Amino acid sequence: MTDPIPALAIVGLGPRGHYALECYLRECSDREFDKNFKILLFEEADQLGNGPVWDMSQPDSNWSNVNDRILELPARPEINLGTALIKSFLSYHDWAAKKPTARSADNSDHYPLRNMVGTYLHERFATLLRPLVEYDIVKLVQERVHAVELTGTGACLTARSGVKFFADQVLLAVGHQPTQQDPQIEGWQAEIEARDALCLFGEPYPVDPIVDAAKTHAGAAIAARGYGLATIDIVRAIADEYGSFSLRDEQSRELTFAPTEDVAPTIIPFSLDGLPMGPKPVNEQLDRQFAPSEKVLDTLRRELNDPALKARATGKAFLLDAITPVIVGVFRELEYKRDDAPSDNDALHHLVKAWIEDPARGHKSCLDTDQPPIDLLKNLVQMANGSAPVSLDYCIGQVWRYCHPTIYRSLSHSALSDDVLAEIILLDESMKRYAFGPPIESLQQLLALCEASMLDLTYLADPDITVTDRGWVLTSGENHATAQIMVNAVLDAPKIADVRSPLIEGLLEDGLVAPVHDELGVATTADSYVISQNGTVIPIAVLGRLAKGTIIGVDAILECFGDRPRAWASSAAKHAISKLAEAQ
């Protein structure tokens, strides 16, 4: 008698694949489905359950961008699969001994190290996997999957070694995939090929090799292409190697940097617009002032779910018309805000929309982005710690963050056209500078490094760059600087057409996946099953950034433990039970 074909194969065991498996097992337990129970798991990394973003071995300089207060990863209940019993596991808050309700709202928020969150995820997954392997429910294949093809009864998965595996259905929970090389990076690689003294890093992670290069090129200048979260991680990692930060003021979180005797490198960040990310408010008390009421969020939810409004939508105005009154209402209620915003409601509505569509327009009620970069950083820090009145643009970003869950639930798998959804997603991406900025302490570190002459902000806004034997020459006006090390800290967007992995390219070539839009990811149903290029739903599901298009908002750790894995798991378990019934 041959072994039964596994009911499920999961490709990718980062946080998303981890939680999806957990949800699937719970669904099977609830439905008392434990006959012929077989699952294939594929993950090439040594660390299971946490993924590279939450790698346990990464340095302490890599911080989470989600504070402990809102990092609500729920406990796992006990799962009884008949033969195997999977024990319960603590929530993140209980595991880390963090009790948000027990702390004062005016205490500074704490942002955990990414390696610590990774340890939690890894330990949780280990207790899930152990009984599954012991009772021969799961087969773990620690190889990369190179191809997935449909068969008459399910799917065939081909590992990198060439070995083929079969399953009734497949879940792709892969994270960041290699993409087509950016032309600028590709050009630089060609130019430095014969220049051994120069060093180019095409990706910001892991940061350790970048730090090692800085030590090898003593006193060198390091240019960072990008001015976002990845650059902040790189800057902090290098700073930790050459000195230490100390707290100058508890309330403002102001820092100083004391360098060691070693000759420290100079770090030169740059980006297209040269604008920094806005920090999140320093504590819950200041943060809550940007939270719309539940009544207001319900109104936003109804508008975004209105079938008639969706049918008439022709662009991003559909979202702007709904969210602008929310932002205006919050701004009006702020006690400590700039007093130069329009007093007329219609004028303020118009200004909010205009700024969201084009932040470069500027207004006296918004931050002056033409001021010196160090002053802009200071202004942002002061608003985040409550020592300066809130500007309209800062308020817009913080309110947008609070509205995100409502936007995600309302617009994912909506009846909006692909073009409208693409506009909204690109608009949402543009808001991340304010809505999903770093902890205030990260910007205080940048300021401390500027004061210590280790961070040079002279070339922030789109400098001219040429490659010479001496390095990358950055030019801004009359100023020139030469960097011997260049780091690309710009992370690729989830554009399916640009992905360069055998797995995804094969699915595209075979017509098994269809991009939602030229600029976006794979089309899926509400329960994450792929809609092929001929419009049929196939037994392959996708969770994560490759599904961005039909789904809005996919990258956050909280989304990995959210509604989408649970919805997929419910459908996957039903499919498995139905398949078993057919075979009997």
Image (spheres, rainbow, N blue to C red):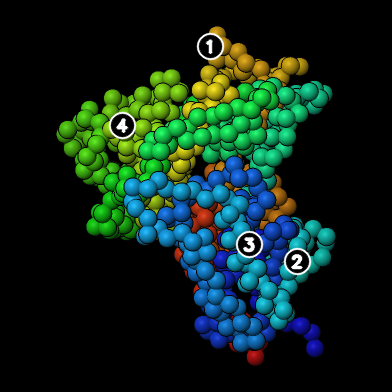
Question: Where is residue 280 shown, x and y percent of the image?
Answer: 41, 42
Q: Residues within 10 Å of mark 4 (few under 14, many from 20)?
A: some
Image marks 1 and 3: residues in contact by CB distance under 8 Å: no
Mark 3 — residue? 122
The numbered disc on residue 141 is 2
Secondary-structure class at tag 4: loop
Gap in angstroms between the C-alphas marked 1 and 4: 32 Å
Q: CA distance from mark 2 to mark 3?
A: 17 Å
Residue at 74% across, 16% down: 470
| Residue drawn at point x = 52 percent, y = 24 percent | 450
Q: Earlier in the sequence, mark 1 or mark 3?
A: 3
**Residue 86 visible in rendering:** yes
What residue is shown with label 4? 388
At a point 58% along the width and 39% down the height, the residue shown is 233
Three-letter amino acid code at the position of disc 1: Gly
Q: Nearer the viewer, residue 376 or 555?
A: 376
Q: Earlier in the sequence, mark 2 or mark 4?
A: 2
Q: Left of 280 or right of it: where is 34?
A: right
The residue identified by callout 1 is: 477
Tell me which amino acid carries mark 3. His
Q: Residues within 10 Å of mark 1 (few under 14, many from 20)?
A: few
| Disc on the earlier residue, 3 or 4 | 3
- The Cα atoms of the two marked residues, 2 and 4, are separated by 55 Å
Q: Residue 509 at what x, y percent from top left? A: 69, 53
